[in-house]
Image (cartoon, rainbow, N blue to C red):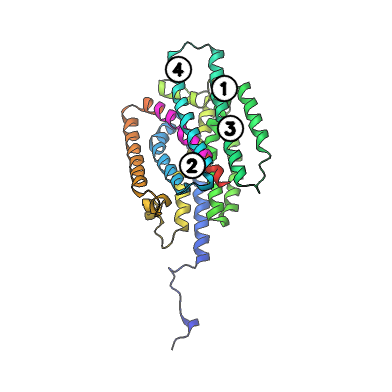
Amino acid sequence: MQSTADLKIPAWTASPARLDRSRTTLFVLALGACALGSAVFASWLPLQVSIVTVFLFAGPHNWFEFRYFLMRLPVRFGNSRNFFLTAFTGIGVLTVTYLLLPVAFRFGSWSEEAWTIVIAGWNSVLIGWIGMLVLLRARQKRKSDWSWFPAVVLAAGAFNWFAPFFFSLVIVYLHPVVALWFLDRHLMRTRPQWVRTYRKFLVILPGLLALMIWRLSQTPPLVDDNGLFWRITQHSGAELLPSVSSHVLVSVHLFLEMLHYGVWIIALPFVGSAIARHGKANQQFWRPATVPLFRHPRGFPRLVAAMLVFAAILVVVLWFGFSVDYATTRDIYFSVAIAHVLAEVPFLLKML
């Protein structure tokens, strides 16, 4: 009889430790490749790559983000009822008023000072809403130290009224970074052994960003030879920062946006595939049954399935709109996209 020691383990059979190390290596390589590739393309052809990137990934990343939020939404709010009611009410009110701002500007006779006050007022409501959510979250997690946040709210409010348009521009640049924070908190919950490696990667990003800025600081401004390029440069803050090369602004913003898309489309699904059983994670990710609101006995399976299908249809509609009239579709998308920017706030707070 052959002893146990003489038995050979097939070469294709990997131990859990070896499998985890291989996945960690793949995770690190994917992070590095995405960061370097994003930096190179954003620096080389910022306007062209921006057009292609938004066309390909703007819609899909919203679908992935929407599905992730459904995963984080509890079946019953319970003690979080006030938190979520405040969150959803704020998202609705702020989104509607934000969409009405350009309408009011176009059909109203606003002086520069009056319009500045309107923008500062909307920003103030946003700051107050976030402050209220933090207060409600602090009541739920009394063991955490939230004493630092009132100072942040006051400082943000002061900066907003001092320079409201610059405050809005800061949000444009900070929003993509929030995705990196989401990934950090998700790793803390699901793959804590990867957190140290991931945070080492985050330390590299400021250096890579500084290298981009230094390399592009002496480049001439990008040529606004059509309305589409003008939209991209203005969205990156070229009008507010005329002393800074628009090449730098567009490249930096595009780099951050590409990281943002990479987190939602590549990193988070990859982490999900690493923790699933029997290697079926990619199949499960596309199944509504993996959403708690779908599979729970007191959930809403038909509603969840319909919402995911409808969101997928919107992605196709968005692609079609970009193909027919890219400039107009881009304007509409970046106006409506404020809803998903706002939605990130309560879900991130629930992960803290």
**Disc 2 to disc 1: CB gap under 8 Å:** no
Number of numbered markers: 4
Residue located at (46% from left, 16% from top): 105
Q: Secondary structure at mark 1?
A: helix
Residue 10 rendering spot, x and y as whole percentages: 43, 72
Query: Which residues are drawn in magenta?
Result: 331-345
Instruction: Check the image and report above or below for 37 versus 186.
Output: above
Q: Secondary structure at mark 3?
A: helix
* Alpha carbon separation for disc pair 4 and 3: 37 Å
Mark 2: which amino acid?
A: Gly
Residue 213 got which mark? 3
Name the residue that disc number 1 marks: 120
Question: Callout 4: 10 Å neighbours few (<14), some, many (20+)?
Answer: few
Residue located at (57% from left, 50% from top): 198
Instruction: Check the image and report above or below for 41 versus 142.
Output: above
Number of the front mark, 2 or 1? 1
* Alpha carbon separation for disc pair 2 and 1: 37 Å
Number of the front mark, 3 or 1? 1
- Tell me which numbered mark, 1 or 4, is placed earlier along the sequence: 4
Dominant SS type (magenta): helix
Name the residue that disc number 4 marks: 104
| Residue 332 highlighted magenta (yes or no) | yes
Mark 4: which amino acid?
A: Ala
Residue in front for this viewpoint, 88 or 328:
88
